[in-house]
Image: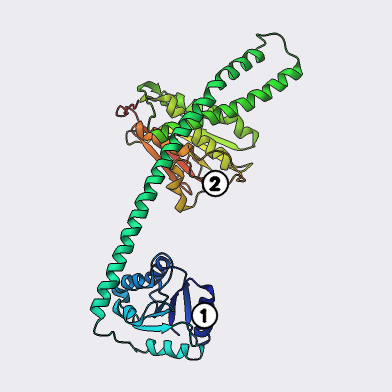
Amino acid sequence: MARVLHIEDDPNNRRLVQKLLGAAGHDVIEAEGGVEGIQLARDILPDLVLVDINIPDLDGYEVTLRLRGMPALQETPIVAITAEGDRDSTLAVGCDGFIAKPIDAARFAETIEQFLRGHRESADDGSDRLLRERTQKIVERLEKKIVELSQTNQRLEDIARLRREFLQNVSHELATPMTPVVGYLRLLLNEELGPLTDLQHKCLRSVEASTQRLRAVVDTLLDASSLETGRMHYYTRPYDFRDTATKAIDQIRAKLDERDVTFIERVPEEPMPAQGDPDKLLRAMAHVLDNASKFTPTGGEVAVEVRPDGEGHLLFAVADSGPGVRPEHIARIMEPFYQVDGSVTRDHGGVGLGLAFARRVTEALGGGIEISSPPAGEVAKRQLPGTLVELRVGRVPERPETQV
């Protein structure tokens, strides 16, 4: 039994070849396009390659030239099976045979057996000229593709610029009216504008909760605007790393209690002096804790540990008992707006900015962020099965560049 790679975009032709060669005892692996076919050929090292000339992305001539450039496939028979193209051109670029469509079903399997046993067709004397002509057409095609890619890249840059401007404008337009809303709501709740009934208090507290949620969204949009435009402002002043971490923990504690999540924390009692931007760091820590809260199931565990890491950095580590993150997603979840599940029907809220924001802030403060799933070690003496996020900052980081 031979392993045959069939590169063909027409499903009817693929089914016919699968039926004919399968009946003859061969294993047929299929690819719908040139790039996919090249990748499969590299991975499986077939005994024979059948390639159509008119296929997507790379055509059959280009695929053949690429396969002939691979040392492991230089002796592998490649047979063109197509209604287009001509025999001499296919042989000139490196094919060993040419089968015209429609396939002669009665003799097809026997013809393939001949190529597997060593049969090769010979190119005519004009093969060098045909190869040059075919190479020239390939160069022209690549030139056209480069022009198209350059134009597409310019359009993408324009779209990215418009997105940055949109985020900046929308975030500021939303932030401006939020200030009086929050202020007047606080005046009402404090009864500075007159006494309230219990029902009015209840209604206003509900409005306040929704307003805080909306304010958090606006703050996230402002962060997104800063990240997109590269205009994140950092300030350097003395602060207590432990105190900043405690504030972030206090913000999430009630949310975890509501969902019956066990919260384990290990925070030193003594101050941990540092220099940097504690306000940005507090929001970075809050984003990481919020992520752990969202992805930990009801009744699960979240562990937090604050300590020096022994290498000149201060560590804020958060581990959870959630489902974890697949290895291929770990690097990308620190990119702005990337979410493993980006659908509007996903189980967890957010816009995919928290970890990107945390990475940018910690790097500016002389540290960085590391993610492992499952956790690479214990946090607060607990080995949890989900995800571990470690934020590190320098005690006295280099002064971050302030962009205006």
- Are there few (<14), some (14-19), or many (20+) residues within 10 Å of tag 2? some
Q: Where is residue 359 in the image (x, y as percent from the top left)?
A: 41, 37
Q: Nearer the viewer, residue 224 or 311?
A: 224
Q: In which quarter of the image is residue 139?
A: bottom left
Q: Which of 105 and 38 is in front in this view?
A: 105
Q: Position of residue 191 (x, y in %)?
A: 67, 11
Q: Which amino acid does label 2 sit on?
A: Gly
Q: How many labels does the image show?
A: 2
* Residue depicted at x 47% and y 33%: 167
Please tell me whether residue 358 is drawn above or below residue 278 in the rendered image. below
Q: Which of 390 and 1 is in front in this view?
A: 1
Please tell me whether residue 137 is drawn above or below residue 247 in the rendered image. below
Label 2 belongs to which residue? 342
Q: Is residue 141 left or right of residue 23?
A: left
Label 1 belongs to which residue? 18
Secondary structure at badge 2 equals loop
Earlier in the chain: of badge 2 and badge 1, it is 1
Q: In this view, does 218 lie to the left or right of 51?
A: right
Please tell me whether residue 296 is drawn above or below residue 131 in the rendered image. above
Q: Where is residue 352 in the image (x, y as percent from the top left)?
A: 50, 40
Q: Which amino acid does label 1 sit on?
A: Gln
